[in-house]
Amino acid sequence: MLTTGLYSCSDEEMSYSLPKDDGQKEMSYKANGISLLEDYISTYYQTSDFVLSQEVYFSDEVRDYAVKEVLFLDTDVTAYVVYDSNTGMLLYLFDKNLTSLTLNTVDIQSGEVDEFTEIDTSPFFGLSNQFDFIKVAGEIANGEFSMVYGVGFDLIWSNKPICPDTGTTNMHVIADGYGDGINKCYRTDCYVQRYRFGFKLKNKPYGLTEADCATGQPYNPNL
């Protein structure tokens, strides 16, 4: 393990192997973006008192990943940083606190942040050893995800907007909304189905969605 801010190691001491299409290739932590990872964690949490711990490689249909566990010396937080194992680009941060029972997820590239509360009520909480994403990544890599959790693994990060097939039941109508005597209608029951590390977590309201007043069909073709 590498202890940030307490010890220094040469790139040679920190070298490890990454699976590549053209065979095994030795890369250093620094070359693979781990120095950037340390900088990101130090800045995000405003501390240097953390330890880079276990690491697992896995893939989904989009790319190849590595997930790095980050342990803190002075908080109850455990973080997992996911990066592209081929380029070193930092992608996602998963941050759990088992005292407050919260899970924060960050899309590092887009800045999208979500907080999930009462995570112990999730059916996946116990099965995943309290959202131990090193364990989960290993199960993905070994093809065991569906067997353990009873659901298929699709993407590590996904936001799928959905409007239920409820017609005009949940409709907000603005009379003469277009200024020409025609009403403007919005669906109020659409939501975003969120998947993080393959798990379906709590839905997020999509917000008002303009729709056909007669049928309730959203004008957005993605809904």
Image (spheres, rainbow, N blue to C red):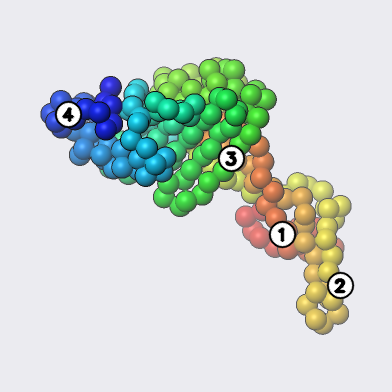
Hey, what amino acid is under mark 3?
Glu
Residue at the spot x=57%, y=25% of the render?
99
Q: Earlier in the sequence, mark 3 or mark 1?
A: 3
Hey, what amino acid is under mark 4?
Cys
Q: Nearer the viewer, mark 4 or mark 2?
A: 4
Q: Secondary structure at mark 3?
A: strand
Regarding residue 102, the answer to whether it shows in the image is: yes
Q: Position of residue 46 (x, y in %)?
A: 39, 41
Q: Nearer the viewer, mark 3 or mark 1?
A: 3
Q: Earlier in the sequence, mark 3 or mark 4?
A: 4
> Residue at label 3?
115
Image quarter where the N terminus lies is top left
Q: Residues within 10 Å of mark 1 (few under 14, many from 20)?
A: many
The mark found on residue 209 in the picture is: 1
Q: Secondary structure at mark 2?
A: loop
Q: Earlier in the sequence, mark 2 or mark 3?
A: 3
Q: Residues within 10 Å of mark 2 (few under 14, many from 20)?
A: few
The mark found on residue 175 in the picture is: 2
Residue at the spot x=32%, y=28% of the render?
52
Hey, what amino acid is under mark 2?
Ala
Q: CA distance from mark 2 to mark 3?
A: 36 Å
Please, which residue is most extreme toward the front here?
Answer: 74
Q: Quadrant of residue 67?
A: top left
Circles 2 and 1, Cβ within 8 Å, touching? The answer is no
Q: Secondary structure at mark 4?
A: loop
Q: Nearer the viewer, mark 3 or mark 4?
A: 4
- Where is 214 relative to 59, above or below? below
Q: Earlier in the sequence, mark 4 or mark 1?
A: 4
The mark found on residue 9 in the picture is: 4
